Every structure is written in structure tokens, then in C-alpha cells.
Image (cartoon, helix red, strand yellow):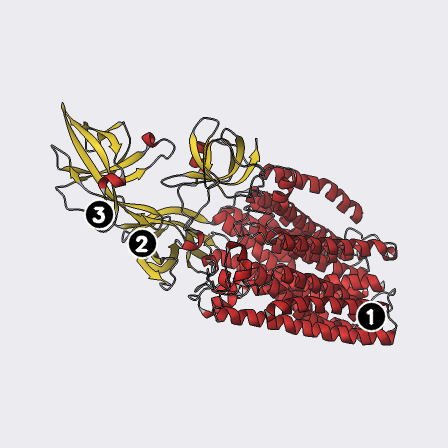
Amino acid sequence: MIAQILIHVLFGMALASTGLYAAALYADTDRAEWLSTIARRIFGALAFGLVASAVVLVILILQHRFEYTYVWNYSSRELPLHLLIASFYSGQEGSFLLWTMFVALIGVVLTPYARRHSYEAPVMVFYGLIVSFLTLLLVAKNPFAYFHESFAADGITIADVRDNGKGLNPLLHNAWITIHPPILFVGFASMSVSFAFAMAGLIRREYHRWIDIALPWTLFGTAVLGFGIMLGGFWAYETLGWGGFWGWDPVENSSLIPWLVVVALVHTMLVQKRTRGLVKTNMILAVASFVMVLYSTFLTRSGILGDTSVHSFVDPGKFAFWILLLFMVTFVAIGITMVLRRRSDMNIHREEFAPTTREFMLSIGSALIMASAIFVTIGTSWPVIMEVLGLPKVAVAIEFYNRVHLVLVPAVLIVNALSLIFLWRSTPRAKMQSLIIFGAAIAAVATAVMAVIGINDVGQIVLAFTAWFSLAINLRVGISIMSASPAMAGAYISHTGIALLIFGVITTSSYTESHHAVLVHGVPTQVGEYTLTYLGKEQVEKHYADREKYKYFVRIERDGSGETVAAVLYWSDFNKRQSAFLEPGIRWGFHNDLYVSPKSTEREDLFKRTTIMRGTSIRAPYDSSVVIELERFTMPMEEGQTSDGRMQMSAVLNVRIGDSIVPLKARTKIATGASGPVFDPEWVPLPGSTMAVGLAEIARNNEDPTKSTGDLVFRDMSKPMPRPREVFTVDFSVKPWISLVWFGVITMVLGFAFSIVRYTRQVRKQSTLVVAEDTPLAGTDTESVKA
Amino acid sequence: MLKRIIILAAIVGIPLGVWIASTYGQLTEVTFAVASSDHSSGVEGDQAPKVIIVSTIVNAAEAPERIACTDHTGAAFRVQYTGSTPDEPFVNGQVVRFVGHVHDGHDSYFHATQVYAQ
């Protein structure tokens, strides 16, 4: 009860802090300082309260307090410690709490930073409003709601405390859940900072200064969100068995869209920092980057996408739906109103960029990245658009995203290289030409080599050429910059990372060899250039009552050497055993990964099998002169149960051999298995031969029982009964250079880290100087000189 | 020039993007037999492609868990509907468009998550 009340109190504190900061904006200096001090303290207490709420929720989960709905819904006694902790943010309520907590903690660091730059009140009034909405969401989706309150309508009383929880979705039973969501939410939380600074800049009519102050934060958000997205891709690849690292699922896209917008913002901020242009663009992009976080959250959390995503979405209830909508609409309205109110002021330094300048290319690059963000938004929103039009809700096919980006990505890579070749303000023609020829020559040779090796798709060739062009220019320019000043190498490192990422995408999409393989236990099977042997299975995680989870060991050999990987396939009560849970077995390698994706497991079919429908006849597979007619199937009640409790059914057969007809009853025992009924046929000798017949399966036609079918199996009784072996069906892939995808993203994030350090130092230096708002920025253009 | 390029690109690009999305974001109307045959080669864990089946409700007595339907070829199949509650209850003889996918197995059925009036 106290925790529930605490959430309401925290909402009140968020409102109070925001209100006091708003009052400070319009108060005289002394009073403003006093108001800000109180607001700051309340905000600090709010952050402490949110951390305390999170800690309390974790403790409740660790103590298995199933009287709380959230604890019951997302945890269970069987979960190990790290998954119990992860249960904290595995549901809607907990993830909102985690997001709010990170926003508040970043706010605690942001407050003194903004204060140092005399931006505290104007920044924190918007930042506080964001926290207010987030805490309001927590009021609507309170993680401390009691079980008996949540299910009161179902007659549940306070005495009906469950002994165990529903547990965590088996898909989330992985170490990555402890890292990926928190990093992603730190990224989401830090998107609020650029927005708050942009709004503060508008209030203060300081259209340039906010750029310097907000740039390190914007870079931080970009790096963290980018890293979080990569971890999600790695998780999907390594554990979820999706076969790839990116599936263009709405939840994946919901992180990608704000990231793309903020990447565009970083580049336009750099342009404004140097040229004082793109003032309105930066304001709009700062608003857009935050609003897209809200829009993506709305799309994925409101339940509006329905069943168009592989991720599970839960309808959060009408109250939370409207808060999410109001949250988004409010900040769109604030952003648009503020920008429109100051639009005439912001046109002071309007200038045209010459096409052969860095600022022009960076602007075009940002526009292209924004185009990507817009296309991904259109694709992700497609189910909603269709619903608004009254048409069936459907997600766009993955090909939509691939096709669009096959045009956009090469364009971005070319523009990236040109932006490094060109200098700020103007570029000497000779230098420009020599660098372009250098990059184009390397790209042409390298692409030709790749074409000889096997790339024959035009789109992939264009992509490869542009990636090589970008890589060559980045390395050439980057190395010279790095030798002079390592701190300035951030952009070049990041862009090199992007080129590596693109190479990883090209090689995996062009050269991945995939084979569908049916592996019989103990039998080496040639699959492509490798020999695969299914060695057997081992049950793991036996303490979970909802599943029988097995590791399936597969030996992969080539040229005398080999390794064993373990793929996982199991069914769980969690999803009512409607579909299997799969985890691939991977042999990691620098130049390729060997990827065994499990598909199904069954017993080897040892006998000749024929399907027969009631009232029809078949010819026996061992002797075509023998005709077998199916008269009918008997019902379980007619046959009675076996001594071990199994049902029995029979196929009533008439076997015609020459002129004689012999009636037979082929019986089968039926047990309930994990994935449906399991049939155990009894063998009935067929007259005049050593063969026997059994009933191996019945497919009942519920609409028309006369059309029900059965599978008859035949075996030679003169031979010993063969032992059925287990068959493990897999998709086996050799993924060349997929490591480049991971190295590429890590390199890109590393580049951001360099830039964060560089611009943080720069802001520190500048904060000691008084820079007049309408005079050119201090400092020489060292980067352009060196480039 | 920059502004003009970007405005022009937006004017051309955004409708183009919507048009491209529309070509990749459409469901096809099929029969139950076609929906069943599209089911991807019996791979466990993979979901069959989402399709529309124009269905005549034959028996709605056990709706929404079990709705007996026929498609336009007259083939009988079962629908399990788990979408939002329709405005009007299902009635026998009603023709609707079910959106969903086939669940294959011993007793295959159509798992519908959306329903629209014909």
C-alpha cells in the first residue's frame, strides 16, 4: 500500500518541481534562485523516490511476494537471481518504472550541468514535465497493484494469494535481458536532454549556445541507444534463433527511428556549430528525436499494433492508452508552438551552403538519414494507417525496408565520404579531386574483387562500392587527423564502423549458405561442405515445471577438424505449447559463424506408411495384389483404456487377397504428448505374408467425420523390430564475416565516445569564455585545415 | 539550393514511400486450402503467412473458440477467433473476412485475429 501511495506522491513531486522551475523562469533573479533551489531539491527527492521504488519492486520479486500482480505476472520461484532481477522490467509497469528512473537519474546529473551554464530553470521545466508524464504513466500502470485488486472482478479476494507466479517468458531467459533493456532505456532517457536544451534555447532566444551545451549529451544518447540496439540484434541472433540480427519488427524499429533522427541531429548540430546555419532544422530535429521516442513507445505499448509484431504487446488499458497519446500530443504541441513562436528570430543568419562544402554534404547526409527514419516510420505505422482506413491491419513485408535502404544506404555512404573530402566553407578543387580519385580507385578495385568472388547482384555491388569508397576516405582522412589530434578522430572512427557494418551486411546477405538438413541420430550427414552428426540430447533446466527443455548436440566437421554445438528446442506451457521455443547452436568464428537453427525433432519413420480415408481402399505397399479397405474407425469408448490409462482406437479393415476378404482390426494406443497425440500401433499379421499392419495416426475431420483419415504402417515380421532413431531437423547456415556487423557497431560507438570526450572538453573551455550570441564562434577551424 | 533539394525530395519521396509501403503491406484473399499449402513446410515455431479468407459462418454456436465456416469454394474449415470483440455477434450464414493464419497439425484450423464485414 505504501509503495502504491509513493508512486502517487512521486507524481505530485514531479509536478511540484516542474511548477517551481516554471515559476523561476518568470521570477526576478533572487526569487528565481530560491525557487530553483527548492525545485532542485524536490527533483532530487523524486529521483531518490524512484530508485527506492525500483529497489522495493526488486525486493518484492526476490521475496516472491505474489500478492502483487506484477510479481505474480512476471516472476516465479524457479527463476535464478539474475532473471528475478530482470523480471523487474520485463512487463509494461516495470519497464515504465525503469525508464522513469533513468530519466530522473540523468536529470540529477543534468541539473548541476545546466546550472553551470545558466540553463537550469528553462531546461528543467521541460525535463520535469517529461518526468511528470512518466510518473503519471506509473500511476496508471502501478507496478505495486495487488493481485486481489487487479482480479477483484473475477471474485479474487485478499486470501487468494498464489503460491507461484506465471514466470518470465521463456524467450527472455537469457543473460542479455540483464544488459539490453537497461542500456536501451538509458538511451531513450537521454533523448529527453537534447529536447529540453532546444526548448530552453528557444525560451532564452539563444539559438546557438544550446548547441554547444547539448552536443555531448546528444552524442551520449546516440552512442548508448546505438549500442543498445546492437545488443538487441546480437540477442536475436545468438539466442532467439531468428537467423539474423535484424528483422524490422516494430519493436526493433521503435528504437531505430529515434536513433536515426538523433544521428541526423548530431550532424546538423555540427553544421550549426561551425556555420550558424540550420538553426530551425536543429530545433525541429531535437523535438523530433524526442517525439519519435514517444511515438515509438505509443506504437509498441498502446496495443495499437495488435498482432502485427512477433513481440508480445499487451493492451495497457484505456487510461494508459490515453496518457501515452496525451504525452505524445503534448510534446508535439509544445515543440511546434515554441518553434513557430520564435521562427522570425531564428532567420537572422540565413546563408546558402555551396555544394562543395562540408556543411552542404552533412546537411544532405542528415536529410538522407531522416528519409530513412521517415520510411521506417511509414512501415512501422502501416498497421495503424490501414486500421484508420478501415482496412485489415497488416505489417509491411521486410522487403519494403530492404528495398528502400538499398537506395538510401549507398547514398549516405557517398555523402559521408564527400563530407570528409570537402572542407568547411570552401574546398580547393585539386585536393577534392585527388581524394575522390583515390577513394573511387580503391573502391573500384575492391568491388571488382568482391564481384569476382561471387557478388553478382547489382544492388549489392553498388552497396559494396560505396562502402569501400567511404571506408577508404575515412581511413585516409582519419589517420592523418588521428596522428595530429586523437581527440578529433571520433567521427572517422564512427564512420569506419558504419562501413564495416555495411560490409558485414553485404557478406552475410550475399554469401550466407543455408541448407535444410534432416539429421538422423548418430548418422553423419553431408550438408554443403560440412558433415553434421546429431549426437543426442540432454535435458536442461529440469526445475521448470512448464517445459521439458533439451539441448540437441550437433557435431560439425570439415577437413578432419570439428566442433560440437548445442541447439535448443522445447515446448512450454507458457504459450500453451502453441509454438516451439528455439535457440540456435553457433560455432563462433572470426571469418564465419556456423549456425545450426533447430526446426523440429521427431522419431525416424521406419515403416512404409499409407494414408487411407474411411470408405476407400488402398493397395498394400509390399504387394499390389492385396487391397485393403477401411470400413470405419472405432471410437475410444468402444475400445476401452489400456492398463496404463491410454486411449485406444482401431481401424476396421477388410483385406482382399484374391477372392477372399479377411476382416482385421488394426488398433492403436493414444497418449497425450507435448505437441499433440502420440500413437503407438499394435501389429496385426496380414494373411498369406510375413507382413503386419498397424494404425499409426488418425486425422479426424470434425466437420465431416466420414472424411477422417488414418495412416497405416507396414512391417516385415520376419525381421527383427528396428529401433526408431531420433531425427533432428535443422537449418544449417555458414555466415561469412558476420563478425563485421558486431565490430562495426562497436567501432561506431567507440567513435562516439571519442567525440563525447572532445565536445565535453570544448564546452568546459567555452564555459569560461563569454561568447556573444551573435558573433562567430571562437577558435580556429583546425579540423578543416587538417582535412 | 539545399532547402529546395530537401523540399523537392520530401514532396516526391514521402508519397513514393507510402506507395511502396502499400505494395508491400497488403494481404491476399485466399481459400483455406491455399492458406494451408502456404504453411511453410511444417517448420515448428514458424508462423504461416497471414492471409484473408472470405468465410461463410456455418455454425457459430461455439464462437469465438470454434466457428465452423466454409470458404468460397465450399470447403469446410474451423476458425478460432482471438481478436477484439466484434460489433455484432457471429451468426450462422453471415459472410465475413477473417484475417489470420493457418495452424497446421492433426486438426488444422484458421487462427483469426481480425474480422471485417464482407
Q: Which mark is residue B101?
A: none
Of residue A648 and residue A146, the one placed in the foreground of this image is A146
What residue is at 58 percent from the left and 41 percent from the top?
A393
Amino acid type at circle 3 is Thr
Q: Where is A339 relative to A378, above or below?
A: below
Residue A47 lies, in percent from the top left, at 66, 72
Q: Where is A94 relative to A609, above or below?
A: below
Instruction: Name the residue carrying label 3.
Output: A642
**For mark 2, does the 10 Å Cα neighbourhood hold few (<14), some (14 to 19), or many (20 or more) residues?**
many
SS of the residue under disc 2: strand
Look at the image and tell me in which quarter the C terminus of chain A lies: bottom right
Amino acid type at circle 2 is Thr
Of residue A584 and residue A506, the one placed in the foreground of this image is A584
| For residue B44, side relative to residue A639 (left or right) | right
| For residue A590, side relative to residue A361 (left or right) | left
Output the chain of dot 3. Answer: A
**For mark 3, does the 10 Å Cα neighbourhood hold few (<14), some (14 to 19), or many (20 or more) residues?**
few
Output the chain of dot 1. Answer: A
- Mark 2–mark 1 contact, CB under 8 Å? no
Of residue A411 and residue A280, the one placed in the foreground of this image is A280
Residue A701 lies, in percent from the top left, at 35, 34
**For mark 1, does the 10 Å Cα neighbourhood hold few (<14), some (14 to 19), or many (20 or more) residues?**
many
Of the two numbered discs 2 and 1 on the same chain, state the one appearing first in sequence.
1
Instruction: Name the residue carrying label 1.
Output: A24
Residue A484 lies, in percent from the top left, at 69, 70
Of the two numbered discs 1 and 3 on the same chain, state the one appearing first in sequence.
1
Instruction: Name the residue carrying label 2.
Output: A533
